[in-house]
Image: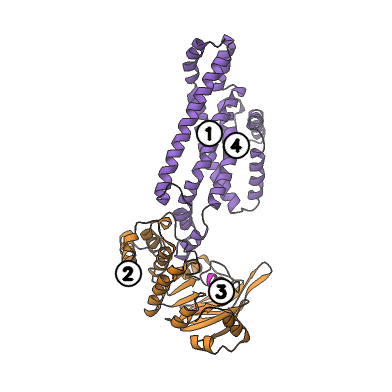
Chain colours: A orange, B purple
């Protein structure tokens, strides 16, 4: 088991967003979380790398046990240095070029030399066919290019898990395909991923496990075929029937 | 009748004290900037007790005329030093020059205004970049220095330029406490020759030239910094 979360709870003022989540992930698994907007999917991801801090719960990551309500700065940094996140709005550093966006984490998160970091960044940019954009700033790139660089920025760190927070939601429809292609390529290479998405076809084709999430709870979990073709829970059925997309 | 000869003769005499105006403005801006950074950090980090106190002081300074603040420092600073002496702290209240008073008052005024500009420049940087920076393993301090601060500086320059130009213009009031700068010199020459419009026009021209030069310098530095930070002169 790579990551195990037990009874994770999170409240914003009086609004309980996560009502005791249990989730475990094996190395190499692609877990896709689906569910209605506002159900707490993103909050769950943000709690895994501590962009939000949970009110209570336990987490075991790489055999290290963590008390989510009481974490030291060292523990937070350790988890962040072994996970990586891809954001809905890319969140590239606007004051850095494409290649610098990728090398910053290597240099300042993983203490690699600038030379090694730039070599790795170059190699990874080349692998997604964006080497010619290495000196471009985010403002000079399309949304699709920015998100693909966002993915490279995360994966170049060689993280144990990559967390994807609706990576295609902010993209124009014609750009979604290239980003999903890169993600599928990663999954094929055995990268452990947790993906929050509304792209049901991606969930069906790439996920090793689909988790249906609603009102801060995991309602149903199973293989894509179990969840999409034979959903057991009424709410899962309602959600799937409400989606117009052909998945 | 407008005496153009008098105006021409007075011009170099008034121009000769322009360095005092510039000196006061630059020193006040530098000290003000250092204090403003401190104030902005205290307020943004919501430092216990200090933050609300600093907030009240800032709104006091921003809400009152600088001439009143200058008089408060002018009459208040010596008394404060005397009081400190009574408490056993060795201070010399007799040695306070008008320049020190002016620098104190203008620095505090600049600090209040610049601190608010720093805060608005900080909030105009997309905070999600900070989250991205810590998510790739940077420490919070490193994320601030590498990602947020450079963008903050680029956003700060236009407002900082305005505050600095205001400082130059506001120093025209320091003649009230006996410092001879552009306005004081114009007053002195006017009262000697009983010719007013000539010298005040001279002062006007000198102020315009100084302000224009500094505005231009800030404009150029903004272009250069934006180019370096974002590779574009204007973002969004």
Q: In the rendered image of this protein, does residue A222 appear above or below residue B179?
A: below
Q: Nearer the viewer, mark 4 or mark 1?
A: 1
Q: Are marks 4 and 1 in contact (CB under 8 Å)?
A: no
- Same subunit, labels 4 and 2: the answer reads no
Q: Residue B165, labelled with which disc?
A: 1
Which residue is disc 4 drawn over?
A: B109
Q: Which x, y percent locates residue A95?
A: 43, 54
Earlier sequence position, callout 4 versus callout 1: 4
- Would residue A74 appear left or right of B108 to someone viewing this image? left
Q: Number of numbered discs present?
A: 4
Q: In the rendered image of this protein, does residue B185 appear above or below residue A207?
A: above
* Residue located at (55% from left, 27% from top): B99
Q: Nearer the viewer, mark 2 or mark 1?
A: 2
Identify the element where label 1 is drawn.
helix
A229 or B154, nearer to the observer: A229
Q: Which x, y percent locates residue B105?
A: 60, 33
Which residue is disc 2 drawn over?
A: A127
Q: CA distance from mark 4 to mark 2?
A: 55 Å
* Residue located at (35% from left, 63% from top): A112
Q: Main secondary structure of the magenta part?
A: helix
Magenta span includes B34: no
Q: In the rendered image of this protein, does residue A129 appear above or below residue B229?
A: below
Identify the element where label 2 is drawn.
helix
Q: CA distance from mark 2 to mark 1?
A: 51 Å
**Chain label for disc 2:** A
- Residue range of the region highlighted in magenta in the rendering: A44-50
Q: Residue A41, labelled with which disc?
A: 3
* Residue located at (42% from left, 68% from top): A151
B214 or A132, nearer to the observer: A132
Identify the element where label 4 is drawn.
helix
Residue B44 makes an appearance in the image? yes
Q: CA distance from mark 4 to mark 3?
A: 48 Å
């Amino acid at each position: 088991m790579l990551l195990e979360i037990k009874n994770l709870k999170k409240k914003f003022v009086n609004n309980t967003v996560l009502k005791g989540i249990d989730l475990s992930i094996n190395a190499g698994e692609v877990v896709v979380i689906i569910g209605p907007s506002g159900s707490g999917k993103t909050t769950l991801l943000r709690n895994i790398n501590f962009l939000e801090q949970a009110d209570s719960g336990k987490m075991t990551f790489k055999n290290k046990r963590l008390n989510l309500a009481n974490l030291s700065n060292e523990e937070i940094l350790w988890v962040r240095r072994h996970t990586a996140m891809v954001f809905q709005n890319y969140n590239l550093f606007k004051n850095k070029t494409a290649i610098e966006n990728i090398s910053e984490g290597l240099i300042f998160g993983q203490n690699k030399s600038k030379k090694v970091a730039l070599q790795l960044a170059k190699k990874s940019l080349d692998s997604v066919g964006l080497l010619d954009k290495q000196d471009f700033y985010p403002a000079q790139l399309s949304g699709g290019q920015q998100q693909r660089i966002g993915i490279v920025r995360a994966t170049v760190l060689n993280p144990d898990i990559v967390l994807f927070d609706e990576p295609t939601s902010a993209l124009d429809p014609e750009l979604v395909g290239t980003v999903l292609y890169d993600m599928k390529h990663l999954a094929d290479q055995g990268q452990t991923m947790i993906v929050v998405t509304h792209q049901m076809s991606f969930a069906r084709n790439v996920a090793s496990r689909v988790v249906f999430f609603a009102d801060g709870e995991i309602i149903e979990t199973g293989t894509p075929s179990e969840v999409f073709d034979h959903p057991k829970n009424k709410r899962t059925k309602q959600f799937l029937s409400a989606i117009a997309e052909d998945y | 009748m407008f005496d153009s000869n008098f105006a021409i003769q007075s011009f170099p005499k008034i121009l000769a004290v322009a360095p005092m105006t510039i000196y006061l403005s630059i020193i006040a801006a530098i000290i003000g900037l250092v204090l403003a950074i401190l104030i902005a950090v205290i307020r943004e980090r919501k430092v216990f007790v200090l933050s609300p106190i600093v907030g009240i002081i800032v709104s006091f300074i921003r809400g009152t005329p600088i001439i009143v603040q200058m008089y408060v420092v002018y009459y208040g600073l010596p008394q404060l030093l005397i009081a400190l002496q009574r408490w056993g702290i060795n201070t010399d209240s007799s040695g306070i020059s008008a320049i020190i008073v002016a620098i104190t008052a203008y620095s505090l005024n600049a600090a209040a205004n610049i601190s608010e500009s720093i805060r608005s420049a900080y909030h105009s940087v997309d905070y999600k970049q900070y989250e991205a920076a810590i998510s790739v393993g940077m420490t919070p301090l490193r994320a601030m220095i590498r990602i947020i601060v450079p963008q903050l500086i680029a956003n700060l320059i236009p407002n900082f330029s305005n505050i600095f130009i205001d400082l130059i213009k506001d120093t025209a009031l320091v003649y009230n406490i006996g410092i001879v700068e552009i306005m004081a010199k114009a007053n002195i020459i006017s009262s000697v020759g009983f010719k007013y419009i000539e010298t005040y026009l001279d002062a006007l021209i000198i102020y315009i030239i100084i302000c224009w030069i500094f505005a231009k310098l800030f404009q150029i530095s903004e272009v250069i910094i934006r180019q370096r930070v974002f590779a574009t002169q204007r973002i969004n």
